[in-house]
Image (spheres, rainbow, N blue to C red):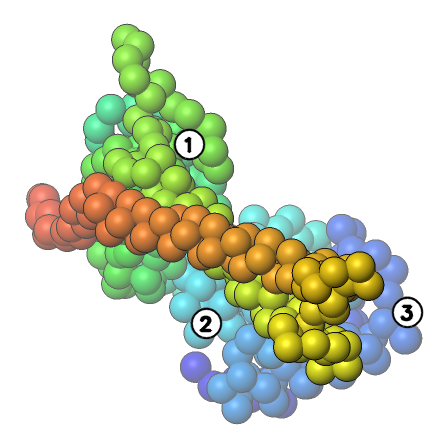
Amino acid sequence: MRLSKGIGSLLVSAALCASPAWAQPINDQVRIAARALADEGFALYDQGKYADALDKFERADALVNAPTVKLLAARTLEKLGRLVEAAEKYRSITILQLDDKAPEAFRDAQETAAKELAALTPRIPTIELTVQGAGAELATVMLDGKVFPRALIGVKTPLNPGVHRVEADTPASSAAIDLKVDEKQAARAVLELKPKTGAEAGGGGDIVTPPGGGESPTKAPPGATQRLIGYVSLGVGGAAAIGGLGALISAYSTRSDMEAFCEREVNGDTPCTNKSQTNDTPVSPRNYVNLRSSIDTKATLSTALFVVGGVGLTAGVVLLLTAPKAKPASPTKASVEPWVGIGSVGLRGTF
């Protein structure tokens, strides 16, 4: 329905010319502002920008509280597919109490709203939500992310056409379905609760114990301890291997120091020895003895660390490769099946 700017302005002007008993006194500033908002709304409506037009009409309605402006807002809601809200807006017009001084345009708006409400009502679809499975009576039901009143479960409830997300949740089970609802459709959604996995039921680490006692479902996965030991072995082996390499490098550095010393101090036929002042027995200088001892110690340490590193790395690899692996959980299959009843159709399913 295309709005005429002239007709729309006339309706608002009629509203602004009267001050009904329920309305606040209207001054010139309010009149001008409301008229400007209505004019902007008409232009946006004709351009198909219904969301923006609705904002203007609702602002104007807040200023003048007139049936004529409410009628424009109701028609815009209908264009947006918000049939439930549009019906309520039409109904709010029909129940307004007009006094004898109310403009004729107000009475015409009420009559028009009643006719358009009668035409709109059959188009509004309904949905009947049902929850089945263990704990269904405790389930929290959500429709499009908002809590669905428990009093409406199992009852036909009006809603706007379109795709809707329906969910049910309990501490131990859940269900969800996406449902497309068309105008005039009487849809029904049956949510079949299915047990949650351990992580979902645990709520971030809490352990859920099944009724009647028994083991907690949140057991450590098979091979977890063996894999932990394997990683520790890899860490120890790697550290030992690095330490052995460091000791070996240090030994070679000390050997270089020793060779440099011997080149400076050689004093006889035997390398790096001096002959005694009292006999011909070779005597090694103290610095040479210290360097030689340090080289032997570092070489021995390097060998030991390499052995430990090799054993640790080998054990770690073997432990990780032979650790039992958890069997992958079989994925939950999503299913949707049609539901047909007398005068109504819908879908039921689980995800």
Read off the residue under disc 2: 80
Relative horizontal placement of residue 148, taking residue 185 as reference (left or right) = right
Identity of the amino acid at label 2?
Leu
Residue lying at the far front in this picture: please name it.
Answer: 279
Which residue is the site of mark 3?
27
**Dot 1 crowding, Cα within 10 Å, few <14, some 14–19, many 20+:** some
Residue drawn at x 90%, y 75% as measured from the top left:
29
Amino acid type, mark 3: Asn
* Residue drawn at (74%, 69%) of the image: 274
Q: CA distance from mark 3 to mark 2?
A: 33 Å
Instruction: List x then y, in percent, for residue 68.
Output: 62, 69
Mark 1 vs mark 3, CA separation in Å? 61 Å
For mark 3, does the 10 Å Cα neighbourhood hold few (<14), some (14 to 19), or many (20 or more) residues?
few
Q: Nearer the viewer, mark 3 or mark 2?
A: 2
Q: Which residue is mark 1?
A: 202
Image x and y of residue 47, in percent: 52, 91
Q: Is residue 56 visible?
A: no
Choose between 11 and 306: the one closer to the eye. 306
Say whether disc 1 or disc 3 marks the residue closer to the N-terminus.
3
| Location of residue 165 (image quadrant) | bottom left
Label 3 sits on a secondary structure element that is: loop
SS for dot 2? loop
Q: Answer with the quarter of the image where residue 292 lies.
A: bottom right
